[in-house]
Image (tube, helix red, strand yellow):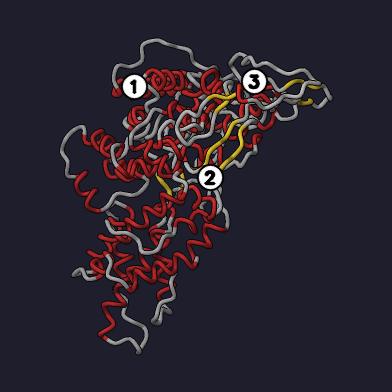
């Protein structure tokens, strides 16, 4: 909390009561794996099904619900109840817009009498700028990982973040986005920043391979560096070094056009050894596809650079490119229409909205991990692939399903989160928390202080395998200097909380505060607790009647702090 300018000897005790009233009990570990012990052995089979997908998005949502309900019936599972419009509103705003709704947005939605108001809201959010920013925030981390402050600045400076946001705003097909990132040869200026996916890895070709496999194909490959995978028989050491070979002729170069990956026509031939010392050539090989043929020099042959090995640049001012381009062959022969490309994204989008993947963890889709609902994964994969890798269509179907719109209260006797019999609540990402804090404290305005970098340090995980709170988060929320400074500015400035503090009664102010922060009507007990806290007389003789408005606003800021640091605010549920 910011240090108040007046005596608050009794305020601390009342805040302790307030926190107890406003905090709800939310289990943080439901995303953990449902079973432990021996490895699972059900293989994840890439889909080549070209059958007829559901004709409409509504039919796709209905098929998801039917398949889940069949599984529940077979397992004698009673699913959680459906949620109210009020709960749905906050949930879908956080998932699709990356923030809580404003009080005005809440009123507009709840006053809408149309039967399809939920679907209309989903469509409106998917078409919004907030959606594009939310997805850019999310996929920046999923594709690149959390970076230092300098790394994040470079992503902005070189256009990577804006490129992501534009792709999601325009609903560019996922396969086209993937090709732009991995070919890293922008045909137009609009794709210049796509090169950053490879460029940031700074010529570390093993790091590139270890990023490409989970980001685009849904499985981790680093364990195959020294030997074939011991848990997933289909993942071979040759796949690891083959993937490295597809990219090991690339070299970072800062050009007049910006960051580029210049590709050589020679080199990149080597051998790798397994743990027994047997050597093998690093052929252009990857999982589920044939080896890409390439003329390989003899062991004693030294390759020479030659103009004949290159062709003209694909665009004026760009580096020339090899006649035989390994990266180009990877995109054309491996990535393009690879069955795992659609499957991995379908599983990841399910995880984004449902709290965990149909294969969990979402980036370990190998034969060591079970598909919990294989028919649903098959359905989503085929639909995603046959409808042009349309991310919005898949998100729309999942968000409009009954499965997504169930209570987060776990049904009695059901403990396995893989049943998806209840909504799996999850902590807000740093970006969601910061954006929601802005709405709660500033309404439609902008925060004068950007907390995103500080919150990222305290809340680093995005789609974690299981939710674990480190000491950094409570320290930031309780007395972090950045949050303290922001709250002090709110106390002193003319912000929406000032209007709340000026309402005719403390009960009205308490109700308005709950609507602004938690997007719901408070209980009578909650209103009374906050109103009692707000109406306490000043304890210091130094405080005059002229200070009363300031004291009232400061108290409201303290109450807001207690709510926005509670579990109910910090989780989507």
Mark 2 vs 1: CB contact within 8 A: no
Q: Is residue 23 positioned above or below 54 on the image?
A: below
Q: Residues within 10 Å of mark 1 (few under 14, many from 20)?
A: many
Mark 3–mark 2 distance (CA, rounded to whole Å): 38 Å
Mark 2–mark 1 distance (CA, rounded to whole Å): 30 Å
Residue 326 relative to residue 233: left or right:
left
Label 3, secondary structure: give it: loop
Residue 325 relative to residue 78: left or right:
right
Percent of width and height locating residue 376: 43, 21
Q: Which residue is mark 2?
A: 467
Q: Quadrant of residue 133?
A: top left
Mark 3 vs 1: CB contact within 8 A: no
Q: In the depicted view, which residue is nearer to us: 338 or 103?
A: 338
Percent of width and height locating residue 255: 52, 42
* Image quadrant in which the N terminus is located: bottom left
Q: Is residue 464 positioned above or below 473 on the image?
A: above
Mark 3 vs 2: CB contact within 8 A: no
Q: Which mark is residue 60?
A: 1
Q: In the depicted view, which residue is nearer to us: 121 or 181?
A: 181
* Image quadrant in which the C terminus is located: top left
């Amino acid at each position: 909390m910011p240090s108040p300018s007046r005596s608050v000897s009794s305020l601390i005790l009342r805040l302790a009561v307030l926190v107890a009233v406003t905090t709800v009990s939310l289990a943080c570990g439901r995303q953990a794996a449902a079973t432990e012990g021996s490895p699972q052995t059900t293989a994840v089979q890439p889909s080549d099904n070209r059958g007829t997908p559901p004709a409409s998005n509504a039919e796709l949502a209905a098929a998801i619900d039917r398949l889940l309900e069949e599984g529940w019936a077979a397992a004698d599972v009673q699913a959680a109840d459906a949620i109210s419009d009020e709960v749905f509103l906050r949930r879908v705003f956080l998932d699709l817009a990356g923030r809580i709704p404003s009080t005005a947005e809440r009123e507009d939605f709840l006053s809408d009498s149309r039967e399809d108001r939920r679907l209309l809201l989903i469509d409106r959010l998917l078409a919004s700028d907030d959606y594009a920013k939310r997805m850019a925030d999310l996929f920046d981390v999923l594709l690149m990982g959390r970076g230092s402050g300098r790394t994040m600045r470079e992503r902005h400076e070189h256009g990577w973040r804006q490129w992501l946001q534009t792709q999601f705003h325009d609903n560019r097909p996922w396969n086209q986005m993937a090709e732009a990132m991995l070919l890293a040869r922008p045909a137009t200026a609009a794709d210049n920043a796509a090169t950053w996916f490879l460029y940031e890895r700074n010529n570390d070709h093993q790091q590139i391979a270890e990023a490409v496999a989970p980001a685009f194909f849904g499985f981790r490959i680093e364990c195959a560096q020294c030997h074939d995978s011991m848990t997933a028989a289909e993942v071979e050491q040759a796949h690891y070094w083959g993937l490295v070979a597809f990219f090991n002729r690339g070299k970072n170069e800062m050009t007049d056009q910006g960051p580029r990956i210049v590709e050589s026509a020679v080199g990149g031939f080597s051998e790798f050894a397994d743990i027994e010392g047997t050597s093998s050539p690093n052929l252009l090989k990857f999982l589920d596809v044939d080896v890409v043929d390439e003329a390989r020099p003899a062991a004693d042959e030294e390759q020479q650079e030659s103009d004949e090995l290159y062709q003209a640049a694909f665009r004026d001012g760009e580096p020339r490119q090899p006649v035989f381009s390994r990266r180009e062959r990877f995109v054309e022969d491996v990535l393009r229409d690879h069955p795992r490309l659609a499957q991995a994204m379908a599983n990841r989008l399910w995880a984004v909205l449902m709290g965990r993947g149909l294969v969990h963890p979402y980036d370990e889709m190998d034969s060591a991990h079970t598909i919990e609902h294989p028919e649903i994964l098959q359905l989503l994969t085929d639909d995603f692939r046959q409808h042009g890798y349309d991310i919005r269509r898949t998100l729309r179907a999942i968000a409009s399903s009954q499965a997504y719109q169930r209570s987060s209260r776990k049904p009695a006797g059901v403990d396995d989160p893989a049943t998806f019999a209840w909504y799996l609540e999850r902590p807000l990402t740093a970006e969601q928390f910061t954006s929601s804090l802005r709405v709660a404290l500033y309404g439609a305005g902008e925060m004068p202080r950007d907390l995103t970098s500080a919150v990222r340090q305290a809340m680093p995980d995005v789609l974690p395998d299981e939710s674990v709170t480190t000491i950094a988060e409570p320290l930031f929320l309780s007395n972090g200097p950045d949050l303290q400074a922001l709250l002090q500015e709110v106390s002193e400035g003319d912000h929406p909380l000032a209007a709340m503090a000026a309402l005719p009664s403390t009960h009205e102010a308490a109700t308005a505060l709950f609507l602004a922060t938690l997007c719901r009507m408070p209980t009578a007990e909650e209103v009374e607790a906050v109103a009692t806290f707000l109406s306490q007389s000043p304890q210091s003789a130094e405080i005059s009647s002229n200070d009363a408005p300031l004291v009232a606003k400061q108290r409201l800021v303290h109450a807001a702090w207690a709510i926005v640091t509670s579990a109910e605010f910090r989780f989507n549920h």
